[in-house]
Image: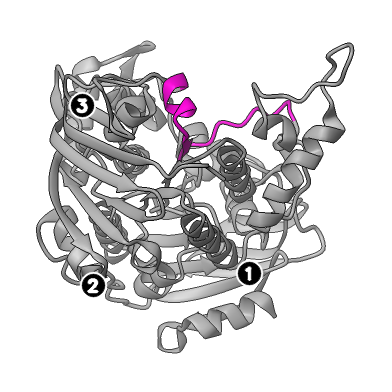
C-alpha cells in the first residue's frame, strides 16, 4: 500500500480534435481514501479524460496537479511513477503467457546469477492478489484459457501489483457475475480504507450508488455536475448524464402469440456434450437467456448460428432444418448473431463505419465484384440515422468510435438483412444508460415487427425488465422457463444454481 495518499486535480482540461471538441474545460479532483464515480454517455469524454490522466495524450489546455506539483501533461511512465494505475474496459492479455507473466509484465522477477525468469517467485507474488480478488484460477494458468470475466480479474490484479495510489477502474464489472462483482466492490472498499483513491467508471449505476463517495458527470465533453453522498441515486445520475429522465427504461414488447421461429431439438454442444437443449423462440417475443457464467449460454448461441458444430441434435428455422456448423446456412435461414465480444468478433476495427455496416450484404451493392460506394454510403447513412450512431463521418474507422456506438454498428450490419431471429449476447455490456435505452427500444421494435429475439444477459435487472419469457440455463441444459408473470431475481437464481 502507498506510503502517502495522493492529491490530484485536473484543472480546466481541454482537448480538441479536428472533428470534435472531446473535452471543454473539465475539472476533477480526487484524494486518497475516496471513491469517485465518473459517469456519462458513450462519447461524453470519459475515455479522453482518462487518456490525459494516464499520459496517453496531452491536453491542449489546462493543468494536472499531483501532490501540489503542476504539469501541463503526463507520460505513461510518469503516471505510473506517481502511483496511477489503470484497468481498461477493453482487455488485451498476452495469450502466450500465464497469469503471473501478464500481471508482472515488464517487472519480471529474475533469479541470480544468470538472470533467468523466476517463475516460482512470480507465482508467490501474484497468488495473494488473486486470493484478494477471489479468483478461481492460478498464477500458472495460461491466459489463453481464461474467460472474459477471469481476464478482467487478471487485469485488476495487474494494477494492484504496482505501488498504486490512484486506481482507475473502467467498466471493471462488465464481464463479472453477481458474486464476482460483489467481491470486487469489497476490494474497492478495502483499498479505500487503506488510503487508495479510486476513480470508478461504469454504466452500472447501482454499483456507483453502492460504493461512490462522490459522482462527477460528463456530458458532450463538459462537466455536467457533481453529486455528493446523500444525493447519489439512480434518477439523479441519469439526469446528470443525459439531461433528462429516461421514461419507461425497461418495457417488454406487446406480445402477440406468434408462430415458432427457432426450435432446437436435443441440441448438444461441445462445451456440454452431456446436456441437451430443447428450446423454442416465437415470433414477436424477446426470450431472455439467463444463467451463471459457464452455464453454456454463449456456446448455445454459437452453435445455433453455425460457428461451432453441434455434437448432436437439430436447429430448425420455421420448421426447416438448418445445416450444422455453417454460418452461411444460418444467415440464409434468417439467423443473425450480435456477439459478446464486439471488438474481436463483431467488427473490422480498421474498416470504416460504412464498410462494416454493409459487410454482411455486399452482394446486394456489388456488380462484377466492384462495390457501389454511393449505395454503400446511402445504406450506412440510413443506419446511422435509424440507430442514432454518433459519428461525424461515415468513412471514420469504427475503432475511433465509443463502445456504445460500436455496438450500434454491429446491430446495424445485421438489420440490413431483415433477420427472422436475432441473437444478442450481452447486448448492453459496457454501454451507457442512454445507449441501453436505444438498444432496448430497437429490440422491442424488432419483436413487435415479427422477429424473434433471443437475448443473453448477465444483468438480472435487464433480463427481468425487457424479456417476455426467460429461459434459465444450468450446466449446458435448460433448467426451466419462466413467464413474465413469474419473473423475479429469486426465481431465476433458484433455477440457475439448482
Residue at numbered disc 3: 63
Q: Residue at 67%, 63% (x, y): give it.
A: 295
Residue at numbered disc 1: 473
Quadrant, the C terminus? bottom right
**Residue in the foreground of this view, choosing between 39 and 316:** 39
Q: Residue at 41%, 62% (x, y): give it.
A: 452
Quadrant, the N terminus? top right
* Residue 221 appears anywhere in the view: no
**Residue in the foreground of this view, choosing between 442 and 202:** 202
Q: Whole-percent x and y of residue 447?
A: 32, 64
Q: Report if the CB atoms under discs 3 and 2 are less than 8 Å apart.
A: no
Magenta span of residues: 77-97
Packing grade of label 1 (10 A; few <14, some 14-19, many >=20) is many
Direction from residue 155 to residue 195 in the image, left or right: left
**Residue in the foreground of this view, choosing between 320 and 129:** 129
Residue at numbered disc 2: 230
Q: Whole-percent x and y of residue 90?
A: 47, 37
Decide: is 256 above or below 204.
below
Packing grade of label 2 (10 A; few <14, some 14-19, many >=20) is few
Amino acid at each position: 500500500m502507498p506510503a502517502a495518499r495522493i492529491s490530484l486535480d485536473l484543472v480546466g482540461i481541454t482537448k480538441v480534435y479536428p472533428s470534435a471538441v472531446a473535452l471543454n474545460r473539465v475539472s476533477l479532483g480526487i484524494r486518497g481514501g475516496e471513491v469517485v464515480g465518473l459517469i456519462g454517455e458513450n462519447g461524453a469524454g470519459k475515455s479522453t479524460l482518462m487518456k490525459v490522466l494516464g499520459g496517453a495524450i496531452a491536453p491542449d489546455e489546462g493543468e494536472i496537479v499531483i501532490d501540489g506539483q503542476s504539469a501541463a501533461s503526463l507520460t505513461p511512465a510518469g503516471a505510473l511513477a506517481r502511483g496511477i494505475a489503470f484497468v481498461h474496459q477493453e482487455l488485451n492479455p498476452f495469450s502466450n503467457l500465464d497469469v503471473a507473466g501478464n500481471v508482472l509484465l515488464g517487472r519480471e522477477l529474475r533469479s541470480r546469477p544468470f538472470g533467468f525468469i523466476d517463475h516460482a517467485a512470480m507465482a508467490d507474488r501474484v497468488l495473494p492478489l488473486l486470493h484478494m480478488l477471489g479468483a478461481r484460477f492460478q498464477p500458472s494458468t495460461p491466459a489463453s484459457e481464461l474467460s472474459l470475466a477471469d481476464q478482467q480479474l487478471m487485469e485488476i490484479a495487474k494494477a494492484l501489483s504496482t505501488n498504486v495510489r490512484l486506481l482507475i477502474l473502467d467498466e471493471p464489472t462488465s464481464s463479472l457475475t453477481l458474486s464476482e462483482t460483489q467481491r470486487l466492490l469489497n476490494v474497492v472498499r478495502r483499498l479505500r480504507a487503506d488510503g487508495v483513491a479510486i476513480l470508478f467508471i461504469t454504466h452500472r449505476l447501482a454499483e456507483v450508488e453502492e460504493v461512490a463517495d462522490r459522482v462527477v458527470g460528463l456530458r458532450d465533453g463538459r462537466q455536467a455536475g457533481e453529486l455528493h453522498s446523500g444525493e447519489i441515486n439512480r434518477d439523479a445520475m441519469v439526469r446528470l448524464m443525459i439531461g433528462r429522465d429516461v421514461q419507461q427504461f425497461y418495457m417488454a414488447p406487446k406480445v402477440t402469440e406468434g408462430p415458432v421461429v427457432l426450435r432446437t431439438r436435443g441440441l448438444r454442444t461441445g462445451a456440454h456434450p452431456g446436456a441437451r437443449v430443447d428450446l423454442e423462440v416465437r415470433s414477436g417475443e424477446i426470450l431472455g437467456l439467463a444463467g451463471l457464467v459457464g452455464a453454456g449460454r454463449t456456446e448455445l448461441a454459437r452453435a445455433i448460428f453455425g460457428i461451432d458444430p453441434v455434437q448432436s441434435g437439430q436447429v430448425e428455422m420455421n420448421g426447416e432444418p438448418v445445416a450444422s456448423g455453417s454460418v452461411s446456412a444460418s444467415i440464409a435461414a434468417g439467423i443473425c448473431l450480435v456477439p459478446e465480444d464486439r471488438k474481436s468478433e463483431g467488427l473490422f476495427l480498421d474498416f470504416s463505419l460504412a464498410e462494416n455496416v454493409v459487410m454482411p450484404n455486399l452482394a446486394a451493392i456489388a456488380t462484377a465484384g466492384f462495390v457501389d460506394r454511393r449505395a454503400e454510403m446511402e445504406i450506412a447513412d440510413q443506419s446511422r440515422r435509424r440507430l442514432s450512431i454518433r459519428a461525424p463521418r461515415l468513412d471514420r474507422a469504427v475503432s475511433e468510435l465509443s463502445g456504445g456506438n460500436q455496438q450500434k454498428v454491429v446491430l446495424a450490419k445485421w438489420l440490413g438483412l431483415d433477420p427472422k431471429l436475432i441473437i444478442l449476447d450481452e447486448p448492453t455490456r459496457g454501454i451507457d444508460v442512454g445507449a441501453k435505452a436505444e438498444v432496448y427500444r430497437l429490440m422491442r421494435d424488432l419483436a413487435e415487427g415479427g422477429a424473434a429475439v433471443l437475448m443473453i444477459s448477465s444483468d438480472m435487472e435487464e433480463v427481468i425488465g425487457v424479456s417476455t419469457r426467460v429461459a434459465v440455463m444450468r450446466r449446458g441444459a435448460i433448467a426451466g422457463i419462466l413467464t413474465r408473470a413469474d419473473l423475479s431475481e429469486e426465481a431465476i437464481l433458484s433455477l440457475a444454481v439448482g
